[in-house]
Image (cartoon, rainbow, N blue to C red):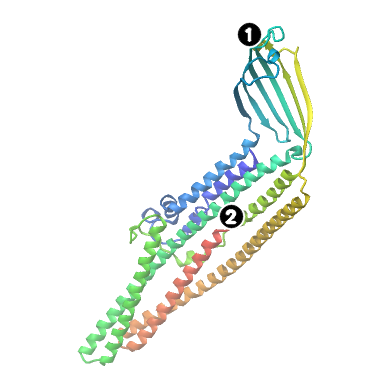
Amino acid sequence: MTDWGLSFIFREMLFSSFFRRGVFVFFCFLSGISVAETLSLDVYLKQVQLGNQAVRSSMMSVEASVLRAKEAGFLYSPTFFADFQAISDSKKPQNPTFQGSKTDYMMGASGVGIQTEFGLQASLSYQLSYISVMGANSVFIPESKYVEARPLVSLNYPLLRNAGGKETRAAFDLIEAQSLVKFHSESYRVKQLLADAETAYWRLILANEMVDIQTRILQKSYQIRDWSANRVKLQLADRSDLLQVNAIVQLRELDLQSAKDELSAASRAFNVARGEEAETVSEDLVSLGSIALSMLEIPNRALFREDVLVAKQLYRLASLNAKLSDAVHAPSLDLVASFALNRRDNNGIDAVLSSFSLSYPTDMVGVKYKMYLDGTRLSDVHQGILKEVESAALSFDRKVFEQDREWKDLTQKFKDTKKRLVISQKMEEIQKEKWSYELDRHRQGRTTTYQVILFEQDYTTAYSSRIRIEADLLRLFTQLKMFGN
């Protein structure tokens, strides 16, 4: 198996496990319902691969590129050829005595040919001909009907153009590079689509968490409102306290509705990614643990991302096209040779049986030369090809630079976001404890409703900030995985 074949198989194995590798370790840190009762990320991404037409299309294109790469092998594969001709010539001859009034000619040939890696073209064929000359003088043409049988070996070796098979090898590599461009391009598209699906998965989890928190806070607001209404009814508090609580209840209801709207949008995006049109998600998802997110680590990185590999293969394509163009326009000097055995007989069977006799051989040795005379045009074409190669090289270099720069930026942002997450988690715990303590004091009549509302607002800001940071961290983690195998 060639390095090309091994590369494809190896990359397929790595590619198929790209989003699954590391997920098991990641979920070991996740708290919540057991995997058997939840829809894990791994299972969800499998659903996306099966249900998303765009993902299936790209994955099929990846498989197709692997199969189409085998097309290059045709350049060196043996070929079978066959030819048959039937000619009837009744034109008036210059010398009917020798040429007769009509000639019938039938010829059939078949054989195998091959192009070798070092440039030699060889063929082995067998020709069988039937000639009938009518109206000729039998004194001069004693055999007016006969059969010719001819085994033939032909050789053609290039001495200039395609010397050593370099043009053929360039054509072979060109087909391989074209397949690799398709392979890497579609592989990267699959990664992008699965990364989008993973983002939709995390978005839905965070949207569910936001709804849960907003619901709990709204319930607390209802309790404060009922408590305040009762105090106003008993004339133990001013009506302004109740109006203030009613306002905050309306604000919390608005926040909950916004969270529900986001949940609906996240649910639709979640289902669309796996090829479904449902408005809601029936499965339970995992619960993100704050500690788990804090323990996420930067994933391993491959040398080149797939989009960079596309640029690399495009540079290779430009170089190979340059080689082919130079070879096509170069002068050609070919050494040709053939060796044939011949047998003619009135009886076709005898001619065939005796055709391998060495009594009547035909040898041929020669050379063929060809060159273009328009040197100015050749020079312009060559300069254009060199600029195409240089352009592709610059494009590849830029892709590598952008990839490295993006990796550094993402890793730094990932580290910074993890630090902010730890701070936000601590801040949320403090604000929640402060709010809960103030609620207890409020129930004991030791603080004002306004103070409780202020502390609730601080807690709301803290958990909203924590969820946004979690979303940023998961998004960065997904983007970093795009750099892996």
Q: How many marks?
A: 2
Q: Is residue 378 left or right of residue 307?
A: right
Q: Quadrant of residue 287?
A: bottom left
From this viewpoint, is residue 208 visible? no
Q: Of the numbered discs in the image, which one, if any, rests on residue 402?
A: none
Q: What amino acid is labelled 1 in the image? A: Asn
Q: Quadrant of residue 226?
A: bottom left
Q: Position of residue 200 (x, y in %)?
A: 43, 62
Q: Residue at x 67, y 54 (%)?
A: 315
Q: Position of residue 477 (x, y in %)?
A: 52, 63
From this viewpoint, is residue 67 visible? yes
How crowded pointer 1 is (Cα within 10 Å; few <14, some 14-19, many 20+) is rated as: few
- SS label for mark 1: loop
Q: What amino acid is labelled 2 in the image? A: Glu
Q: Residue at x 72, y 9 (%)?
A: 140
Q: Nearer the viewer, residue 155 or 8?
A: 155
Can you say whether 187 is above or below 422 in the image?
Answer: above
Q: Position of residue 123 (x, y in %)?
A: 68, 27
Specify which label sits upstream in the sequence, 1 or 2: 2
Q: Of the numbered discs in the image, which one, if any, rests on residue 347?
A: 1
Can you say whether 173 is above or below 198 in the image?
Answer: above
Quick one: quadrant of the N terminus?
top right
Query: What residue would you read off at disc 2?
Result: 306
- SS label for mark 2: helix
How crowded pointer 2 is (Cα within 10 Å; few <14, some 14-19, many 20+) is rated as: many
Q: Position of residue 282 (x, y in %)?
A: 33, 58
Q: Quadrant of residue 401?
A: bottom right
